[in-house]
Image (cartoon, rainbow, N blue to C red):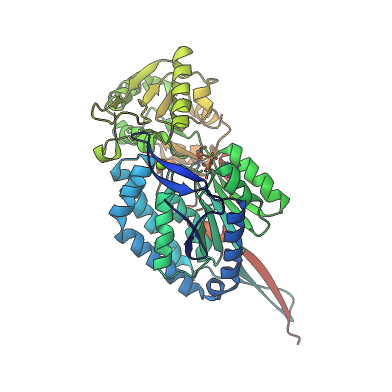
């Protein structure tokens, strides 16, 4: 039974209800987490306020950085243990889980190192004045993360906030909290002052709502669906606080006739099967220039049909989906596409040795997907890839931009001028040229436009998001 982490201590929730922890490979519960309530969120926010005004807030930037660097070292040293926890909790292959833990450690390393590197400005002003702009913490920041990459999300969201001197309250997703709780333990071991980092597990509608609406929170960072993101933004608006929203995507891979297909094909398959397609940055649409469509689809289908699905220990390409609801949602999309006569070009295979009772789905490649079909526009959040032909560059750009989302895009072409031209016309937060970068990329500013959200995390830009500039104007006289 897992407890809440508030004010540097493991503590019971105020209610006595718990939430089972399910292994997605078997559908069986193997642990329980505490169901934190609004009262627990309130306790956590108060603890964070005290830490921010007290021990944590009094540390120098370099001392905060060192604390984060110690966390990074401890996370890295416990990679196997944390990866095993993450794999069991989320169903992802062990190899993916190991990478996730490495990336989590890297976030604490990057922001630990960056904590004392963001400098202020001196502004030229009237002759008898001296003006500086300094960056200060917001105070208490609230963080709500999803279940798909829990350890990575903890690093991405908390490390920059802590680096800038905020104290944080985190509500992880009820479906995958275990690695997050271990990282809280690591914070304790790394010597982080009590209250600087708090974790309240619980339900979105209960603990999540309470955190979004808490007047003691000065900034909210939310990663999840556009629907819930909008609710969080509304709650933040009531308190007039800033929100960083990292939401979904329907990211296109644009393949021109002159592309290096040997380079592109494995990357395109991986970008949709990684984490069983449950990645906000999944490359879920492949737009292919008409003249190579036939040949491309044949080669893509040959690779896609080799995708294998199984449990984390089997370490194949794909694990199960996270829960029953996700399984129903993804199989619903597949059924609808088949019912509406969209062609199935290839399917991956569930390994015979996969355990029974798991939330496994066969990865499916569809094409050509009509431009107005749900599969062409909606985020499936599963291993379902849509292929669509386009005629020329203008058509490709129009099609790429024709969804409500704008998170990532990839351009596959050998033509250098076209690479830049297309990259500039795409409406999204990151463009990859002859490569595709789902996950990782700690240094690279990341975020969306349109329904993919707003605000930026990763890189130095996250330090700007998680701090607030203050202009100090001094009259010093003649
Ligand atoms: P979700 O339902 O929006 O949940 C995300 C988080 O919000 C969870 O911690 C959830 O808690 C919490 N939550 C739910 N209802 C809430 C409410 N009313 N108020 C406050 N918090 C609430 O999303 P999901 O289904 O777990 O994740 C899938 C979505 O996340 C996809 O759309 C995906 O693209 C997006 N995503 C985006 C990124 C990115 O960086 N842009 C990364 C990963 C995922 P409970 O789960 O405990 O209810
Ligand atoms: Mg789980």
Picture coordinates of residue 198 (x, y %)?
51, 60
Q: Quadrant of residue 225?
A: top right
Above or below for 424 versus 362: below
Viewer-side residue, 60 vs 310:
310
Quarter of the image containing the C terminus?
bottom right
The residue sitting at 66% across, 68% down in the picture is 470
Who's the residue at 58% across and 55% down the image?
40
Whole-percent x and y of residue 367? 42, 19
- Residue 390 visible at all: no
Task: Kindly tell me whether residue 336 is visible in this rendering.
Answer: yes
Viewer-proximal residue, 172 or 252? 172
Which quadrant does ligand 2 occupy? top left
| Residue placed furthest toward the bottom | 478
Q: Residue 284's x, y, as percent?
A: 44, 31
Count of numbered circles on the image? 0
| Horizontal side, residue 127 vs residue 88: left or right | right
Q: Is residue 185 left or right of residue 218?
A: left
Which residue is at a point 43% across and 69% down the rendered structure image?
67
Relative image position of residue 370 (x, y in whole percent): 50, 18
Q: From this view, report whether residue 440 is shown above or below residue 345.
A: below
> Relative to 107, is 193 above or below?
below
């Amino acid at each position: 039974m897992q407890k809440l982490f508030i004010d540097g201590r493991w503590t019971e929730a105020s209610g006595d209800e718990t939430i089972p922890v399910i292994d997605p490979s078997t559908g069986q519960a193997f642990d329980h987490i505490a169901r934190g309530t609004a009262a627990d969120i309130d306790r956590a926010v108060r603890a964070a306020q005290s830490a921010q005004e007290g021990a944590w807030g009094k540390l120098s930037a370099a001392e905060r950085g060192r604390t984060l660097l110690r966390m990074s070292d401890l996370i890295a040293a416990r990679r196997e243990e944390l990866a095993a926890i993450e794999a069991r909790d989320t169903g992802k292959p062990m190899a993916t889980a190991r990478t996730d833990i490495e990336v989590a450690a890297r976030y604490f390393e990057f922001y630990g190192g960056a904590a004392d590197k963001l400098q202020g400005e001196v502004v030229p002003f009237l002759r008898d004045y001296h003006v500086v702009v300094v960056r200060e913490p917001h105070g208490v920041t609230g963080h709500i993360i999803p279940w798909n990459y829990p350890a990575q999300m903890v690093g991405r969201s908390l490390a920059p906030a802590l680096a800038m001197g905020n104290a944080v309250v985190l509500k992880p997703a009820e479906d995958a909290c275990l690695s997050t709780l271990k990282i809280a333990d690591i914070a304790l071991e790394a010597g982080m002052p009590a209250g600087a980092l708090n974790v309240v597990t619980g339900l979105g509608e209960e603990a999540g709502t309470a955190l979004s609406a808490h007047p003691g929170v000065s900034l909210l960072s939310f990663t999840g669906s556009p629907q819930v993101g909008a609710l969080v933004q509304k709650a933040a608006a009531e308190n007039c606080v800033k929100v960083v929203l990292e939401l979904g995507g329907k990211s296109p891979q644009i393949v021109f006739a002159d592309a290096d297909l040997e380079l592109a094909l494995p990357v395109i398959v991986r970008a949709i099967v990684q984490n069983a397609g449950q990645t906000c940055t999944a490359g879920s649409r492949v737009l292919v220039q008409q003249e190579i469509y036939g040949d491309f689809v044949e080669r893509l289908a040959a690779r896609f049909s080799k995708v294998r699905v199984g449990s984390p220990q089997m370490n194949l390409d794909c694990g199960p989906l996270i829960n029953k609801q996700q399984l129903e949602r993804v199989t619903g999309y597949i059924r609808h596409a088949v019912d509406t006569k969209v062609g199935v070009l290839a399917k991956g295979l569930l390994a015979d040795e996969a355990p029974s009772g798991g939330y496994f789905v066969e990865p499916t490649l569809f094409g050509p997907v009509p431009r107005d079909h749900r599969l062409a526009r909606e985020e499936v959040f599963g291993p379902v890839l849509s292929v669509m032909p386009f005629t020329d560059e203008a058509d490709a750009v129009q099609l790429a931009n024709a969804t409500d989302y704008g998170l990532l895009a990839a351009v596959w072409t050998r033509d250098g001028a076209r690479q830049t031209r297309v990259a500039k016309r795409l409406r999204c937060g990151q463009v990859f040229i002859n490569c595709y970068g789902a996950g990782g990329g700690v240094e690279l500013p990341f975020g969306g436009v349109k329904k993919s959200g707003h605000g930026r995390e990763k890189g130095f830009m996250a330090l700007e998001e998680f701090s607030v500039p203050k202009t100090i104007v001094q009259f010093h006289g003649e």
